[in-house]
Image (spheres, rainbow, N blue to C red):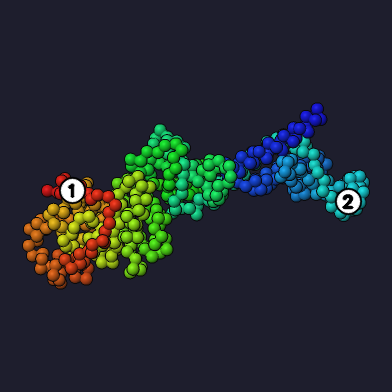
Amino acid sequence: MAGKKKDAVVDSGKQLLEALDLIEKEKGISRELMFQTIEDALKEEYKAEYEKKQGDSRRQAAGSGAKKATNVEVDIDHETGKIHIYSERTVVSDEDHRTSPEKWMNIGITKARQLDPSAQIGSMMRLEMRADEFKRTAAKKAKSTIIQKIREKEKEAIVNEFAPMVGHIVTGKVERVTDHGDILINLRSDTITPGRRAGQDESEEYRTPTMLREKDQIRGEVYHPGEHIRVYIQKVEDGGKAGVTIEVSRTAKELVKELFEEEVSEIHDGIVQIRSIAREAGSRTKIAVSSSDPNVDPIGACVGPGGTRVRTIVNELGGEQIDVVAWDENPAIFIGNALSPASVSQIFGEIGDDDETQDETEGRRRTNNSANKAIVIVPDDQLSLAIGKTGQNVRLAAQLTNYHIDIKSESEFYEANPDAAEDFEGEEEYDGEPEEDRIYLDDGDMPEEGSTAENAPEDIPDEDGRED
């Protein structure tokens, strides 16, 4: 029986170590941190149990409660997993110990010298307590506390790892697709486990679960269990008992920005700047760029030799069309670039006040994102192309430039405004607006060739895009 009891103790320590190894692997919490957590929890529960025991005897003798047992220590052997509980006590005379109301804080000289012949009154002794004295109820409570503490450490580890990743891209592995169309994925935990170890299971890296909601998925993409996908982290939030929430997206326009920063060294180095992005995920994105170096073509840098750079991003986004256009400080030129691939004849507009009420109305031929307004005149055969299928081209251009854009064909505009040509030549006012609040684009300001680049064929003219 003695042999079995010893084996049971050894097995118990071994089981503890195996459990800690598993938690470290799956949750990314270090063994040292878990040892400390367990020791602290056991110490608190043992102290509470010991105080209760001593308090009962004191109340019987003096009718008072017990003081805090501050002299208890718990130590776990990190090699065997065996738990040791110690009590620090002061050596006192036998009489003082007999009359002391806090016997758990001291030890009589006679008993002390039985344990250590060199003991002296006033010295300190470290006594190991019998673990089987730790009542079952206290042990159960300690287990509950340990589980709670480990969960807290797990949440803390997740927040510490992924909070700095808000605004960046991480890799995830698809686990399953729910009945509601959401995707359960496990995020890669490179911060906790930097690099692969020899023989390491890939699942050790992809261990932080989150949900890619259906609304944050790129339309038309199909996800399969085991597939690796890249997602943009929008928010990391500790929800208390509900756990940590990590919001991820494949539809955010910032995902495109991050992909360009990864792929284009000139952007990473700050030579090329991303000025604005407009995106309809799964269909089309427009991105406006500029360069701080006159010798660096921002569009060429983003597109790459033979389109290699932008093609890599297009493939990552499931074939989404990307138009890279040149940003310009002249709003009219920028608007002309943004409406690519359509050709523009003339542009004029008004710069609104920042506090002007915004009109969010969207139409097939115009859209309104701000108080800034622009009328764009295009050749008759370019009208459908400028508007785009279902109004997408003008809609994205409006988002990109932050201008309300109203597109008209040449024949339509000049028929309705026969004197407009004179106004374009610099009249002090047009439609009641002072000249300094107007923008112009005439033949001499037309975008230069190469000011826009598209990675996919031009929009198919939408015969229904023109309003009657």
User: Of callouts 2 and 1, which one flags the residue occurring earlier in the amino acid sequence?
Assistant: 2
Q: Residues within 10 Å of mark 1 (few under 14, many from 20)?
A: some
Quarter containing the N terminus: top right
Q: Nearer the viewer, residue 462 or 91?
A: 462
Residue 80 in view in this figure: yes
Q: Nearer the viewer, residue 133 or 180?
A: 180
Residue 356 in view in this figure: no
- The quadrant where residue 414 appears: bottom left
Which residue bears the numbered disc 1?
Answer: 461
**Horizontally, is 320 left or right of 193 in the view?**
left
Name the residue: 18% across, 46% down.
462
Residue 11 vertical position relative to residue 126 in the rendered view, above or below: above
Name the residue: 34% across, 57% down.
304
**Horizontally, is 379 left or right of 138 in the view?**
left
- Residue 4 place in picture, x, y as percent: 78, 29
Numbered disc total: 2
Q: Are marks 2 and 1 in contact (CB under 8 Å)?
A: no
Which residue bears the numbered disc 2?
Answer: 92
Name the residue: 53% across, 42% down.
202
Label 2 sits on a secondary structure element that is strand
How far apart are labels 2 and 1 at the CA level?
Answer: 99 Å
Residue 107 vertical position relative to residue 5 in the rendered view, above or below: below
Task: State the residue lying farthest toward the front.
Answer: 306
